[in-house]
Image (tube, grey):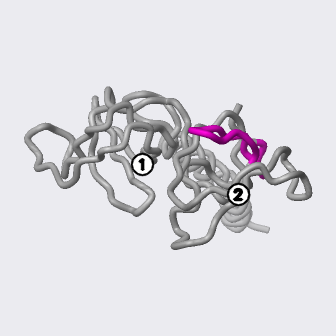
């Protein structure tokens, strides 16, 4: 076998061996980029994440500055919102109805709250004495009741509010992710 043929075979073998290595490196770069995108550029906290409003008057703006037009005014302290992006002292948020805009970070709290089944128009959600649908019912909560979230185990959340305290199925809340554990 001639030297040029050996060289061609060796080059092909090297290229075949290099392809999986290049793919693995590309995958690692993508995974690192995805991890970087999952944390806010300003806070370093996970994005998206749920927080609540500190005040009963919070302006929702078109963009991340006071120069941008106010598109909505939230008027319910404790309302849960989802942070979807960060820019300096501004947070892009989404409410339970899908409205999105920018809010000053100082008007947001890390306190976890949730709305009971805001997607239901009528009907009630059951609050139980224990994290078990076979346990005693302690209350029936209407849609859009604001609940403080004490903890969640991925299926059930311990919540409390004005006149109620108990467990509710996590799937009946807007303000916690499916299967999320809140301690």
Spot occupied by residue 166 in the image (x, y as percentages of width and height): 74, 42
Q: Quadrant of residue 87?
A: top left
Asked if residue 157 is among those painted magenta in the image, a careful observer would answer: yes
**What label sits on residue 20 in the rendered view?**
2
Camera sees residue 71: yes
Residue corresponding to mark 1: 84
Q: Secondary structure at mark 2?
A: helix
Q: Nearer the viewer, mark 1 or mark 2?
A: 1
In this picture, is 145 found above or below 183?
below
Residue appearing at x 43%, y 36% in the figure: 40
Residue appearing at x 68%, y 59% in the figure: 171
Residue appearing at x 62%, y 46% in the figure: 28
Q: Which residues are magenta?
A: 153-167
Residue appearing at x 43%, y 46% in the figure: 81
Relative to 30, 179 lies left or right:
right
The mark tally for this picture is 2
**What label sits on residue 60 in the rendered view?**
none
Label 1 crowd bin: few (<14), some (14–19), many (20+), radius 10 Å: some
Spot occupied by residue 75 in the image (x, y as percentages of width and height): 30, 44
Spot occupied by residue 175 in the image (x, y as percentages of width and height): 55, 49
Q: Quadrant of the N terminus?
A: bottom right
Asked if residue 159 is among those painted magenta in the image, a careful observer would answer: yes
Mark with earlier residue (1, 2): 2
Q: Quadrant of residue 95?
A: bottom left
> How far apart in space, not on screen, are marks 1 and 2 (Cα)?
35 Å
Label 2 crowd bin: few (<14), some (14–19), many (20+), radius 10 Å: few
């Amino acid at each position: 076998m001639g030297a040029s043929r050996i060289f061609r075979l060796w080059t092909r073998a090297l290229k075949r061996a290099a392809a999986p290595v290049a793919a693995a490196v590309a995958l690692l770069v993508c995974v690192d980029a995805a991890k970087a995108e999952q944390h806010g550029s300003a806070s370093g906290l996970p994005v998206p994440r749920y927080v609540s409003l500190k005040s009963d008057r919070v302006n929702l703006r078109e963009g991340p500055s006071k120069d941008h037009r106010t598109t909505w005014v939230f008027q319910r302290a404790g309302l849960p919102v989802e942070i979807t992006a960060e820019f300096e002292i501004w947070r892009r948020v989404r409410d339970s109805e899908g409205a999105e805009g920018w809010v000053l970070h100082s008007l947001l709290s890390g306190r976890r709250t949730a709305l009971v089944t805001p997607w239901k128009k009528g009907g009630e959600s059951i609050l139980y004495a224990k994290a078990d649908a076979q346990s005693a019912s302690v209350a029936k909560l209407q849609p859009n009741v604001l609940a403080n979230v004490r903890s969640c185990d991925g299926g059930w959340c311990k919540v409390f509010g004005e006149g109620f305290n108990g467990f509710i199925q996590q799937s009946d809340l807007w303000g916690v992710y499916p299967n999320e554990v809140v301690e």
